[in-house]
Amino acid sequence: MKKPKIVGRKPIAVELTKGEEKYFCACGESKSPQFCDGSHRTTPFKPLAFTP
Ligand code: FES
């Protein structure tokens, strides 16, 4: 089973807009590590949708 790439182990502060749907990167391949940029297409992973 393939494992996601770990890009860091420390919390990252981000600004979010209440009610705006976001997609958390679950594969670790995104150029913007905390959010999905579509790079997961070559992996078995899917982004995790959330709404703050
Ligand atoms: S780029 Fe990592 S889940 Fe989409």
Image: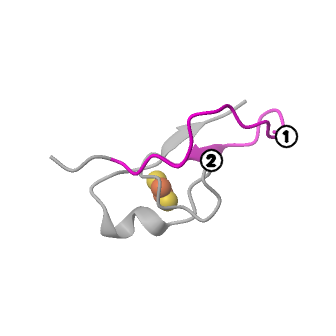
Image position of 4 (left or right of 51): left
Looking at the rendered structure, the secondary structure element under dot 1 is: loop
Q: Quadrant of residue 9?
A: top right
**Where 39 sits versus 49, above or below?**
below
User: Disc 2, ligand 1: is the CB inside 8 Å?
Assistant: no
Q: Looking at the image, do the residues carrying marks 2 and 1 touch, with CB atoms under 8 Å apart?
A: no
Q: Amino acid at mark 1?
A: Glu
Query: Mark 2 Cα within 10 Å, few/some/many (few <14, many 20+)?
Result: some
Q: Mark 2 or 1 closer to N-term?
A: 1
Q: Identify residue for label 2.
A: 34
Looking at the rendered structure, the secondary structure element under dot 2 is: loop
Viewer-proximal residue among 29 and 9: 9
Query: What residue is rendered at 85% in x and 40% in y?
Result: 15
Return the x and y of residue 21 as percentages of the image width and height.
Answer: 67, 43
**Where 52 sits versus 29, above or below?**
above
Q: Quadrant of the C terminus?
A: top right
**Where 39 sits versus 35, above or below?**
below
Residue 12 magenta: yes
Return the x and y of residue 13 as percentages of the image width and height.
Answer: 79, 36
Q: Identify residue for label 1.
A: 15
The residue range painted magenta reads 4-25
Query: What residue is rendered at 50% in x and 66% in y?
Result: 38
Q: Amino acid at mark 2?
A: Gln
Q: Quadrant of residue 37?
A: bottom right
Q: What's the colour scheme?
A: one colour
Label 2 and label 1: CA atoms lie apart by: 11 Å
